[in-house]
Image: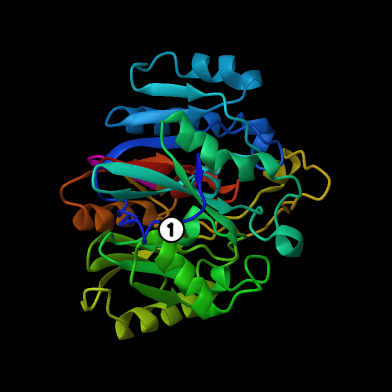
Amino acid sequence: MLIRNTTPTADGFHMPAEFAPHAGTFLIWPVRPGSWTHGGRDVQPVFVRLIEEISAVEELYLLVDDAHRVQAEAMLSHLPQQHIHYLPIPTDDAWARDMGPTYVTGGRERRGINWCFNAWGGDVDGLYPDYARDDAAAPLMAAALGDTCYDAGDFVLEGGSIHVDGEGTAVVTEACLLSAGRNPQLTKGQIEQKLKDYLGVTKIIWLPRGIYNDETNEHVDNVFAFVRPGEAVLAWTDDEKDPQYALSQADLAVLEGETDAKGRRLVVHKVPIPEQPVCITAEEANSFAFADGEDMREPGERLAASYVNFYICNGKVIVPQFGDRMDAEALRILGDCFPERKVVGLPARAVIVGGGNFHCLTQQIPAV
């Protein structure tokens, strides 16, 4: 059921932080030939590792179409199955964060939010032209769990473009939310009000930019994340020649001048980006099969690799690893930020070639 005549805030609901307890996680089996090398063959073993880690601590809901159900079940057959649930909901790609339901909670109930999804920019700069199944998936995902969904109408938003602390603060990037392919008919103030109405927040912090060359128009979840109320991490480089240097400097300047909804100055931990830029190889570029109108990858193209695109689940933090010297340093810093959780590094090269990482692939379902 879609709720159209009210908003979460009006009903006393709010979006809890990702570090709050989860009931489960959504994932989508990756098969789109234009997103994944060799039609998903290279990334699917990483999904198996990701599912193994998450399903050990919470329920795992895996969307998989009928054509790939046998494949997915076979690759996951060695894992305990009691916490893995297969959902036959069709999608166009595997980015559950962006087109799945954003959850809000109120008292003992949770509800989803169905945003409008237009493949990160629609006719302006969207990444693929046929995204109808992605746009329709959120209410179906919520319904599969017995949850209702608020309908945000034609307001375009992706889950990766927002981060909240669960205490009234949301952080977004201007590069994404003010992009021409999202909601050009709305002013910045009107976008702020939409976020307040649907996320149950009272304060929006606008970072100028995200990660360099991020094809989502620089989602916040690649550059910034809360680790607890009043404390966050920011993707960083000290290399003044790197294009990310100026972007992160601008973001830090904003964070240092802001307070959160509770009036606190944020404690910000700097997490390095990979020392060596992660770029598409010729072999990888040749292994995609792009549909007409789909954004294409080119050899040498720099990817938006970031350790901040981690996923927090019950008792764990799952962190991308790129085979870079900074892998261990990122794990060390995040281990200090999350002393109460196990920090797990998983190989992420096969994921980043699709355009995002572990946070982009997952959507948390809060406990109530």
Q: Which residue is mark 1?
A: 7
Exactly how many numbered labels are in the figure? 1
Foreground: 33 or 127?
127
Please name the amino acid that badge 1 sits on: Thr
Q: Residue at x 66, y 39 (%)?
A: 133
Residue 40 in picture, x, y percent from top left = 62, 32
Magenta highlight on residue 317:
yes
Foreground: 310 or 4?
4
Q: Is residue 271 left or right of residue 192?
A: left
Q: Is residue 344 visible?
A: no
Q: Is residue 337 above or below residue 248?
A: above
Residue 54 in picture, x, y percent from top left = 34, 33
Q: Residue at x 33, y 17 (%)?
A: 82
Q: Residue at x 44, y 40 (%)?
A: 148
Q: Residue at x 37, y 78 (%)?
A: 252
Q: Secondary structure at mark 1?
A: loop
Quadrant of the rendered structure where residue 316 is? top left
Q: Is residue 341 above or below residue 266?
A: above
Magenta highlight on residue 189:
no
Q: Is residue 15 left or right of residue 167?
A: right
Q: Is residue 218 left or right of residue 33?
A: left
> Badge 1: how crowded within 10 Å, few (<14), some, or many (20+)?
many
Q: Which residues are magenta?
A: 313-319
Quarter that holds the C terminus:
top left
Foreground: 41 or 220?
220
Magenta stretch secondary structure, dominant? strand
Residue 122 in picture, x, y percent from top left = 71, 58
Q: Is residue 171 above or below residue 291?
A: below
